[in-house]
Image: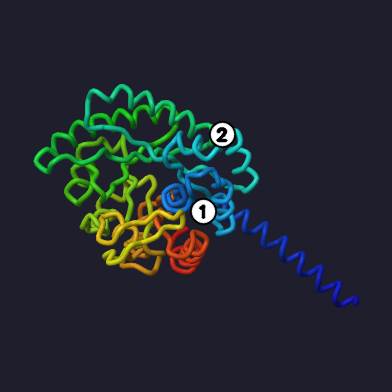
């Protein structure tokens, strides 16, 4: 009996010590890990009032991640009945953070610039209230290839000013490339965007699955422009053509042969695709990167909990020993 009591006390003591060590080392980490709410709003939740925003937060917490990127701000919070004060409370209960939010607009249309800048002020106020310091900026739809350079020039003029707006709030803005019909898609366009924006004002927040599908040399871009990274998405990728329909968790049917269906299947859990994240992580270490990495799955064949548990195991085993 005494021996059992002693062992129980030892176990409790070790558990408490582990919690203290975990808490201490978490403050020393250079990288925080997030997921994007887009997975839930696009393929998981039905639009019938049944979705619970807290279900997503529980998965994030249970998988050992640190926070999330909010998409569709502010409509997503309204759509899923999660007002800001309640979100603050729910994040605090789980020890989670709002990493950033997805921000867009018709940046290549000069007539829209004033409205987009005004919206950027509101986005920064929202982020600031959560202690977030990164704004993730998406590009507008792409024009005909002949017009890309002119549209990019107009967009970059605005993005520099968006960077100035953000700086006034202690926030940095970074461009997020996209392979599904947006202005910044392939290697030349990523490079052009980085040339036309001021590195002191506007930064880079790339997404690996979109770089992969855009035909980019991911490693060359990270090596060359690693100093401009302020956040990024790590999504493993492997080309999988959608030969059959795909039925999402929310019941939506993505048709065989369609562009979006193939894109969904190209999303892979970390370690299952063709991207060498260890190589990218060594670039982050050399550049002393400190910030958020988002695991931006758009589709999970089993469940978000299953995929993010697998990704977190990959991070712990393969990436943390390189740089955390």
Residue positioned 33% across, 36% down in the render: 104
Q: How is the image coloured?
A: rainbow
Viewer can see residue 190: yes
Which mark, by number, is residue 29?
1
Q: Is residue 313 left or right of residue 10?
A: left
Whether residue 282 is visible, yes or no, is: no
**Dot 2 alpha-carbon crowd within 10 angstroms: few under 14, some 14 to 19, many 20 or more:** few
Relative vertical location of residue 74 with respect to residue 321 in this rendering, above or below: above
Say if 12 sits above or below 181 in the image: below
Q: Nearer the viewer, residue 111 or 187?
A: 111
Q: Given contact means CB atoms under 8 Å apart, are the residues at marks 2 and 1 in contact?
A: no
Seen at 59% across and 58% down, the residue is 62
Which part of the image, by quadrant, shows the N terminus?
A: bottom right
Q: Horizontal and vertical percent for residue 271? A: 39, 68
**Residue 151: % across, % down:** 17, 35
Q: Position of residue 262 (x, y in %)?
A: 29, 60
Residue in the picture at 76% in, 69% down: 11
Does dot 2 land on a helix, a strand or a loop?
A: loop
Q: Which residue is mark 2?
A: 83
Q: Earlier in the sequence, mark 2 or mark 1?
A: 1
Between 215 and 44, the one nearer to me in the picture: 44
Name the residue at the left extreme: 146
């Amino acid at each position: 009996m005494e021996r059992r009591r002693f062992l129980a006390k030892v176990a409790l003591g070790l558990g408490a010590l582990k919690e203290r060590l975990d808490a201490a080392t978490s403050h020393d980490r250079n990288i925080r890990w997030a997921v994007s709410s887009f997975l839930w709003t696009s393929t998981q939740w039905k639009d019938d009032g049944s979705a619970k925003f807290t279900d997503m937060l529980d998965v994030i917490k249970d998988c050992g991640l640190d926070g999330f990127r909010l998409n569709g701000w502010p409509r997503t919070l309204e759509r899923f009945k999660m007002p800001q004060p309640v979100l603050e409370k729910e994040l605090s209960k789980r020890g989670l953070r709002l990493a950033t939010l997805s921000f867009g607009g018709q940046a290549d249309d000069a007539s829209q610039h004033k409205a987009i800048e005004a919206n950027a002020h509101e986005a920064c106020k929202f982020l600031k209230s959560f202690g977030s310091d990164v704004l993730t900026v998406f590009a507008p739809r792409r024009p005909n290839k002949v017009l890309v350079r002119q549209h990019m020039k107009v967009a970059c003029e605005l993005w520099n000013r968006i960077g100035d707006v953000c700086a006034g709030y202690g926030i940095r803005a970074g461009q997020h490339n996209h392979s599904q019909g947006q202005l910044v898609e392939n290697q030349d366009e990523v490079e052009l965007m980085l040339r036309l924006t001021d590195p002191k004002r506007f930064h880079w927040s790339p997404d690996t699955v979109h770089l992969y599908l855009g035909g980019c040399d991911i490693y060359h871009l990270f090596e060359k422009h690693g100093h401009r990274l302020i956040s990024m998405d790590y999504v493993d990728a492997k080309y999988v053509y959608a030969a059959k329909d795909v039925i999402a968790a929310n019941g939506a049917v993505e048709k065989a042969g369609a562009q979006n269906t193939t894109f969904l299947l190209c999303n892979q859990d970390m370690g299952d695709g063709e991207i060498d994240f260890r190589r990218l992580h060594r670039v982050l270490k050399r550049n002393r990167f400190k910030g958020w990495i988002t695991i931006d799955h758009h589709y999970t064949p089993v469940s978000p909990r299953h995929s993010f548990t697998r990704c977190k195991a990959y991070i712990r085993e393969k990436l943390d020993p390189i740089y955390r």
